[in-house]
Image (cartoon, helix red, strand yellow):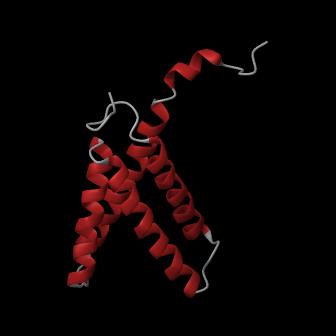
Amino acid sequence: MQLSVFPHLLSYQQLSPVLIRLAIGAVFIYWAYKDFRQTRTTGINKALAVLQGIVGILLVIGLWTQVAALVAAVSLVVVLIQKIRTRVFLNNGVNYTLILLVLALSLLVTGPGWWACDYPL
């Protein structure tokens, strides 16, 4: 008796972290681009935008994935704390950030998946 509806798809289980990596990496690269292009951005915000861009690039290429996921998770926790302090918790933007945080923590635990520079052999 098989419990899985599609047991042949389980051979592709390492594809899931790849999709998560690419999605979070793309979001971080977009946020960095958006923050870096703003004219009123201070020096600290530009430095954070550069850090976001580096994290995004590392996630997309799969290099130091767990370190990049940890940095992404910490930055997303900081964003969530700021939103909680301003009492905008559980609106659409916070839900999005919370989902990204869960995905980053998932990458921290599962690793990079296929097609990564730090894929464990």
Residue 119: quadrant of the picture: top left
Q: Residue at x 27, y 69 (%)?
A: 49
The foreground one among 85 and 105 is: 105
- Residue 118: x, y in percent? 28, 38
- Residue 65: x, y in percent? 34, 47
Residue 71: quadrant of the picture: bottom left
82 up-or-down from 117: above or below: below
Q: Residue at x 22, y 74 (%)?
A: 47
The foreground one among 25 and 68 is: 68
Quadrant in which the N terminus is drawn? top right
Question: What count of labels does the image hold?
Answer: 0
Q: Residue at x 40, y 59 (%)?
A: 70
Quadrant in which the C terminus is drawn? top left
- Residue 45: x, y in percent? 27, 79
Q: Residue at x 30, y 72 (%)?
A: 35
- Residue 73: x, y in percent? 44, 62
19 up-or-down from 54: above or below: above
In the displayed structure, does residue 2 sit left or right of residue 13? right
In the displayed structure, does residue 51 sit left or right of residue 88? left
* Residue 121 appears in the figure: yes
88 up-or-down from 91: above or below: below
In the displayed structure, does residue 29 sit left or right of residue 78? left
- The extreme right residue here reads 1
In the displayed structure, does residue 114 sit left or right of residue 12? left
Residue 53: quadrant of the picture: bottom left
